[in-house]
Amino acid sequence: MRFVALALIAACGGTAEPGSGEPPFEVTDPTDADEDGIPEQLEDHLMTVFGPELRLAPDDIDWTRPANVDWYLPKVHMRFDHGGCPDDNAIELGQVTLDNIATQQHYTKASGTGLCRHNDGTADLRFSNKKHLEFFLQPTDDDAVHPGIPPARSAEWRAYTQVRPSTYVRADGKAAAYDLQVWYFFPYNDFVALANHEADWEHITISIAADRTFVSAFFASHNIGHRFDDPAELEWIGDTHVVGYVSDGSHATYHSAGAHPTGFPNVDDHTYANGPAWQTWTNFKNLGQVGKVLNDQRWASYGGRWGEVGNTDDTSGPPGPMFNGKWDITNEYPQ
């Protein structure tokens, strides 16, 4: 693919540089339903051109694979966490849908009485369309759900995107006009013994100039990330698709294969070059923005956890993209 691109450019008397852009694109549909100032037609085009290729660990090393929301929801029930009391079922198994996942409400339970009873005050009511992490999704058949969708059905793996106006400026002065955020979902995070948890949302952000050339890439990894402004430091597919390496079990994403420090003492992430390759731009949904969800992806307004509640945040399922701190892309910029 890269060879073909180089040959075409050479035939026209030019030279190809990674991230150097693509042929002119004309917006013919100005619809901007999420009201972020960027037509959805252009947002989808940016993903088609700049969406990353993700390299996963080989099958004999990692048993956790990506999935998609439509596959996951029928396999879980929604529960409500009550510290010191049994959890309540909010939605039964098989009945969690795109329509009802973000429309639930539930009262917290009273403490200090020795009894498990609900409060009834306005301040005690929780809503599933807010970041109320008492709501959580839980599979009932771990063996069927935790592995995700196998590589033999990789066409079902789906990425979820947002495109926002960018304020990122590289040290050399090159400014980005758009930030393309690409999110991907795994039903299970198999990191280390004390930090495993159900459900895992990870992402890459590609910053793109107004002339649709590469500016920068941010690879999210655990609670931090790594930014690269120099395209020569990255691997590319077809000159515009950056390559990301997804680590074994934890799904933190890096720019290269090998061992990567995690910030946890004596624990490295490991990425590989010889596993399944996922071209995220072949199956994606544009989520839009908070309060302006696109493409019938109504689940994105759900503010609870996507996996069961553990003893700590590191052992609990995370919230979804719109309720993740990295959804606000300014949190990825150097301070």
Image (cartoon, rainbow, N blue to C red):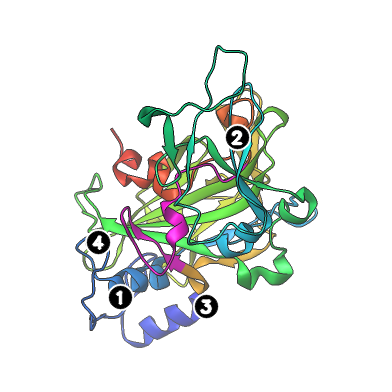
Does 134 sit above or below residue 285?
Answer: above
Expressed as whole percent of the image width and height from the top left, the position of residue 67 reads 62, 60
Q: Residues within 10 Å of mark 3 (few under 14, many from 20)?
A: few
Q: Amino acid at mark 4?
A: Ala
Residue beneath disc 1: 41
What's the mark number on residue 1? 3
Q: Quadrant of residue 126?
A: top left
Left or right, 328 with respect to 106, comes to left
User: Whole-Å distance between the Cαs marked 3 and 2?
Assistant: 41 Å
**34 and 42: which one is in front?**
34
User: Whole-Å distance between the Cαs marked 1 and 2?
Assistant: 36 Å
Expressed as whole percent of the image width and height from the top left, the position of residue 75 reads 68, 57
Q: Which residues are magenta?
A: 285-307
Left or right, 318 with respect to 84, comes to left
User: Whole-Å distance between the Cαs marked 2 and 4?
Assistant: 37 Å
Q: Amino acid at mark 1?
A: Gln
First of labels 3, 4 by sequence position = 3
